[in-house]
Image (cartoon, rainbow, N blue to C red):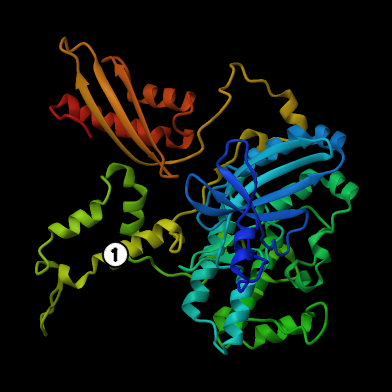
Amino acid sequence: MSVPERSSGSGGKEEESEDESEILEESPCGRWQKRKEQVSQGNVPGIESASLAMDTEEGVEVVWNEVQFSDKKVFKALEDKIKEMFENLMQVEHPNIVKFHKYWLDMRESGARVIFITEYMSSGSLKQFLKKTKKNHKTMNVKAWKRWCTQILSALSYLHSCDPPIIHGNLTCDTIFIQHNGLIKIGSVWHRLFVNAFKDLYEHRQVRHHRDEQRNLHFFAPEYGLAEDDYAIDIFSFGICALEMAVLEIQANGDAVVPKEAITHAGQSLEDPLMREFIQSCVRHDAKKRPTAHDLLFHRVLFEVHSLKLLAAHCLINNQYLLPENCVEEKTKSFDPNAVMAEIQHTDRPGVQLRYSHVSPLELDKFLEDVKNGIYPLMNFAPPRPHPMPRALSLSQEHMETVKTPTPEPQETETRKVVQMHCNLESNEEGTKTHLTLFLKMEDKLHRQLSCDILPADSSKDLANELVHFAFISEEDCDMLAGFLEEALSKYRSGGTGW
């Protein structure tokens, strides 16, 4: 899931640019168009080809990744397992993790391919950013360092709290990406799952293991590869990333591998004792003594009490489905700019008044957009809850074979989340039934309009369950939609017209 910089030069001729944008191949559905231009995958082995592609529905660039299988018999034997793993990867959803869009399998006479589409991070990797910063003789801003650490830990906390936990296993400054707005995303999440699921295949294909990349050896914990994967290997890697972010580069002094002495020296060069303590706790030799990602978010160097502004922004974003589009813009227009929004009174000196004119609507819109994009995650607020993954990921292969479902399940399920919803209710002339029209806006900006007749005996929970069963909404949205319909029906029966 790693998607860094383009490998082609930026100063090429116009003819070369046109040649690179040539469409080589289309996905079976026609949505994804592979281009000739290659992108560098950084430190992610196993991908034979990574090309720039176009998402024709959204009009954005994505990465077209290919994994080749020369032995079709081996591929056929592993086909179900490959499908299962990639289906599970499509369930991983977090603002600080590179998005996994789609996958499909392609059988040819010469062999077989797994093709998967991932988000394209146009601004490049964290490693590139740190090099540019150092080249310009600048130092790392402490606030930016804290914000980046929080975002990375937010993603790791999400992965580690999945049921079962997902271990990244390949976290380096090459597999962390930064967008122009400061949003951090970690990529290559798929790779460790792939290695663990197909160990025999990796040995068969003699794929070069990422640990052979000498320049990144210092990111991997001492116990890496010697025992079962555990969250502690990710914490060690994060600690080295946090150190590199703080000092911009850990000097190898000409060696192929960054020595332990260089890491120690870089840590000691940090002026902030809290920062030193924070990083040292991550890179302890004893894996059992390393803190969890969630614990690190409570460390004194990162922890802060969330502002009321941030809490309100998250509340607004999480309940966006209850509000009409552009509600913030419309609401701010209706305010009297000279009206007092808040006031602090003092007995011994003049009070302080905050007026609506002091708040820029544009700044407010940008802040809400940043919160929505994951730049300011709401952490240090509640204990982590396990994120259940699909049953196929949470059960061993042997256990899966013994599990039988009593009733057939639908072939497809909806994974997109609903971000906005409206409904309209109208009764027939006899008043025996009500016609419901439901408008849903999905997270990929596509709209869905549904309608049905409901009887007085129909419950909102049953209606929501039906929508899940027929793959109109995801199971995660079932309770939310049931509550929304319950409110709408109550309002309608008390004399309203819709919601």
The spot of residue 118 in percent (x, y) is 60, 51
Q: Is residue 139 above or below residue 280?
A: below
Instruction: Classify residue 331 by image quadrant.
Output: bottom left
The spot of residue 100 in percent (x, y) is 59, 48
User: Would you say residue 310 is visible in this rendering?
Assistant: no
Which quarter of the image is occupied by the C terminus?
Answer: top left
The spot of residue 433 in percent (x, y) is 24, 14
Q: Residue furthest front?
A: 15
Q: Is residue 93 above or below residue 125?
A: above
Q: Residue at x 28, y 23 (%)?
A: 436
Q: Is residue 31 above or below residue 308?
A: above
Q: Residues within 10 Å of mark 1 (few under 14, many from 20)?
A: some
Which quarter of the image is occupied by the N terminus?
Answer: bottom right
Give the number of callouts.
Answer: 1
Query: Of 400 and 429, which appears nearest the observer?
Result: 429
On screen, residue 348 versus residue 256, left or right, reads left
Q: Does dot 1 land on a helix, a strand or a loop?
A: helix
Q: Amino acid at mark 1?
A: Leu
The spot of residue 375 in percent (x, y) is 45, 63
Q: Residue at x 68, y 51 (%)?
A: 65
Which residue matches tag 1?
A: 364
Instruction: Classify residue 371 by image quadrant.
Output: bottom left
Q: Residue at x 56, y 28 (%)?
A: 412
On screen, residue 277 versus residue 421, left or right, reads right
Query: Of 48 and 210, which appears nearest the observer?
Result: 48
User: Would you say residue 490 is visible in this rendering?
Assistant: yes
Query: Of 310 and 47, which appears nearest the observer?
Result: 47
On screen, residue 269 versus residue 380, left or right, reads right
